Image (cartoon, grey):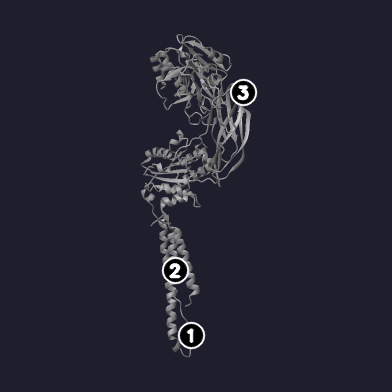
Amino acid sequence: MQFAHPLFLFALFALAIPILIHLFNFRRFKKVYFTNVRFLTDLQQESKRKSKLKQLLILAARLLTLTCLVIAFSQPYLSSSVQQKQKAGKRAISIYIDNSFSMEALATEGRLIDIAKSKANEIAQYYKPSDIFQLLTNDFEGRHQRFYSREEFTKLVEEVRLSPVSRSLSTVIRRQNDLLTDRQNMAMNAFLISDFQKSSADILFIKPEPSCSWYFVPIAPQHRNNLYIDTISFESLVHRPNQMVRLKIHICNYGNESLEKIPIKLTINNIQKAVASFSVESNSTTEVILPYTENDAGIQFGTLDLIDYPVQYDDQFFFSYSIFPKIPVLCINGASENQYLNALFKGDSSFYFINLFDKKLDYTSFGNYNMIILNSLEEIPSGLVQELTEFSKLGGSLVIFPPLHMNSDSYRTFLSAFSLPSPESIDTTRQPITSIALESELYKDVFEKNSSGKVILPENADFPLVTKYYRQSKNLQSDQEPLLKLLNGQPFLTLTRSDKGKVYLFSIPLEDSWSSFPRHLLFVPTLFQMAYLSNPVKELYYLIGSNEIPLPFDSLNGKNLLKIRQNDDGAEFIPGSGALTSRMSLLIQDQVKKSGLYTLLSGKRPIEGIAFNYNRSESNLKTFSESEIKKQLSRHSSGNIHLLPEKKTSLAKQIQNINQGAPLWKLFLILALVFIASEIFLIRLIKG
């Protein structure tokens, strides 16, 4: 046992006072004369013995009372393992405040972030002004990488704000380990103040510095309910002016209460497009579909809004996409232009259709087109193979109609670049097309659906008739999708993907002598859908923290400076950039901190719309309870990790108890009261 104030022990000399009083204040008995005292002799002797015993017991009670009071004021304690390990002198204290969006939730005392800041200041006040302090948040700011005085630390704490950045607990502790490494000559203490969300608090994987004392300070929200928009997508990738589209919205309810008739609003280019209401069960998800009519061509900026409290950062969702006025299509012809392709694309204002011959190609212009059609090229030179391969990898669509007479070796080399089977021989067996991949991306919006949402073709449907076709050299591989099949199972139209692009291979040339397909109704939606789906598939949104954004290089003017402007306040910044053949990647480099809608500008010309949303990893407010944290911390063998639970005892007092060991002053104070009560009992109740 040790004492916080050992000088108080000198007061034990005061024990001599009651002893002296006892010695010099014996009770004197008066003589009383009786006619016959023979019968009182035994009684008198017995009373004297009882009185002497009573006085000794009272003296002992008084001495023990004074002893317990003196010891209580000297504050005895049992030394702890932390105290035994602590080095004397200055201390280095690192305090982490979790400022992620989940700390916006409410507790009985207010917002969690405000409570965390208050606790950080309380911890700082416990230590001496001569100690040094370091503040850490999820932002990992440069100014938080050094130690400050207590006064400077308090000012930094007041500046802490909620941040979209979320860090795992193991990442935070690694940073604290690095910052404390240079302070090995000092007593080191590290505090982690957080709600300890299950999504980020990977307690089992932390590796705290053994020479440092670690303190976990949990703050629990009063309610863990949260409703938020998680993800969105369109049912169809095709966007055309004045066309009806359906937006799918995935909504999560992380709460113990079912919600009904919650309104949600869709705005496109600052015009309200749709309003709906939805219901969602507790701790579950739902999907809301909002149909609306597209605007005219151009950049589309969309915003979804719902109402939820108190966590509101995830109640808005931003997205952006473009509707192209014309789709550029290039047709590379062998001997002559094709009348069916000309009639299809040149007669529709939605397309910009160009015919070129294989002997007069400018390979550098391929990046200006979304789709390239190879029409009856008898031979494909190696240079063209290389350029078409690069074109498809970067997102372009390639459509191949074989020629009447081909160079087999040339086509074998070309098609092998896409892992496609090469035409082997001509089969002249007459048979119809009998199978259509109705669930494929190409055909899912072509045919009318019944009330259950399925397409059922009639048994006597009029399908194109094939007179002859090219048989393929081998069976289809797993990455190849047959979209149209003949009666004998041979593929008529095959789709394969080449990185970001698509490659369509027909088994016939566009000639009447081979098939009725060019004159059939199926020909129009098939080629149109290929062209519509060739539009660059741009991400509807990015999460804050995404660094690289791919954009088409051909839409950028290299003479002008690229800038990204926020639509709301007009703030601009210059992103980094990197070119890859016909594609451009923008490097954001953590310059976006706020969710919202942004516009990419080349000079003053808008190029693309970009939407940024906060990461939804913080939206699930489920946290570890104190018992769960304690259980997981117990799996770490080191005895330098402590849990400071939320209870009536102040945080500073809990730290003091851990640092100074178990205090015993309360015990001695209680004993003093017991001995005082004993003295009263002896004086008042025991006669003699």
SS of the residue under disc 3:
loop
- Which amino acid, by three-letter code, is at mark 1? Val
SS of the residue under disc 1:
loop
Q: Count how many numbered circles sit on residues in the image.
A: 3
Report the residue at 42% width, 28% height from top: 478
Mark sitting earlier along the chain (3/2): 2
Location of mark 3 (residue): 242
Location of mark 2 (residue): 61
Report the residue at 39% width, 15% height from top: 408
Whole-percent x, y for residue 148 in the image: 45, 39
Mark sitting earlier along the chain (3/1): 1
- Give the CA distance from mark 1 to mark 2: 33 Å
What label sits on residue 32 in the rendered view?
A: 1
Whole-percent x, y for residue 269 in the image: 61, 26
- Which amino acid, by three-letter code, is at mark 2? Ala
Mark sitting earlier along the chain (1/2): 1
The N terminus lies in quadrant? bottom left
Report the residue at 39% width, 39% height from top: 177
Q: Examine the rendering and report whether any part of residue 631 can be seen.
A: yes
Whole-percent x, y for residue 225 in the image: 55, 43
The image shows residue 135, relative to residue 674, as above or below, that is above
Mark 1 residue crowding within 10 angstroms, few (<14) / some (14–19) / many (20+): few
Whole-percent x, y for residue 578 in the image: 45, 21
Front-most of residues 613 and 637? 613
- Give the CA distance from mark 3 to mark 1: 126 Å
